[in-house]
Image (spheres, helix red, strand yellow):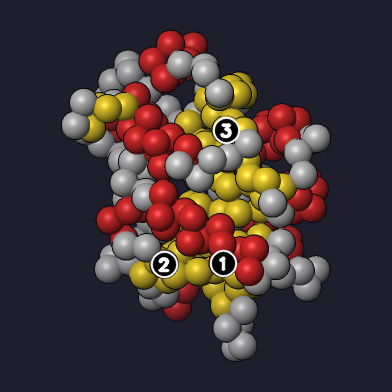
Amino acid sequence: MKTACVVLAAGLGKRMNSSVPKVLHLICGTPMLQSVLFSVKRLRPERIIIVAGRHIDMIKETIGTDGLFYVLQKEAKGTGHAVLCARPQLKDFKGDVIVLNGDTPLVSHSTLGKFLKLHRQDRNLISVLSFNAENPANYGRIIRNDSGHVVSIIEDKDADGAQKLIQEVNSGVYVLSPPALALLDEIRKNSLTGEYYLTDIVYAAARKGLEVSAYCIGTEDEFIGVSTR
């Protein structure tokens, strides 16, 4: 089956205190977005879509456009909205879509490949790559029912006391089978932040009885997102 990849790179990175967009800051001399793309390209996807915000021209100039599709997210309305912006580029695509963040430069191609294989092996509609965090604060928690099936992902700011104790958290990496893209229309604006969370697509699928799984693989270090210099 064919694979596409959507890389979310529209974040402003305000805590970086820099005019340079976060995903272009250098790690060992390489823009962190480029490090993510190195891992993604080893999966040999049919297309790679980068969702960028107001710095889209700077990102194009730095990363290049060869073999890449760029999509503009005009307003920072969250990860769900970002993938919705990319959906027109996938309207004729019949394959699985990997979604990941452009500020996680340590994510490995081997973990992504294993994750994609598990998704296809279990014939999921949606798969989430999770990990056990030593300190789960600020991560979305993976919520499972008594049978162990994933029913939702609760963002840290929305979690209650019991949910905050859960250590299995969302890495921000997903695989969506083609029908899952229609569920983006069911994501509603979060009342606290005014954003559309991609995590809500998991609840939308689970409540319909569709197959959703979370795979706790990889190391915590791989999924550390950069927030400050």
**55 relative to 114, above or below:** above
Q: Which residue is mark 1?
A: 118
Residue 23 vs residue 212: left or right?
left
Type of amino acid under label 1:
Leu
Instruction: Identify the residue under disc 3.
Output: 48
* Residues tagged 2 and 1 counted as in contact (Cβ below 8 A): yes
Measured in 3D between alpha carbons, the distance from the residue under mark 2 to the one under mark 1, in whole angstroms, is: 11 Å
Mark drawn on residue 217: 2
Q: Secondary structure at mark 1?
A: helix
Q: Quadrant of residue 220?
A: bottom left
Q: Is residue 150 above or below residue 136?
A: below
How far apart are labels 1 and 3 at the CA level? 21 Å
Residue at point 39% right, 36% down? Answer: 38
Q: Do we see residue 137 in this rendering? A: yes
* Amino acid beneath label 2: Ile
Task: Tell me the quarter of the picture where residue 22 sits.
Answer: top left
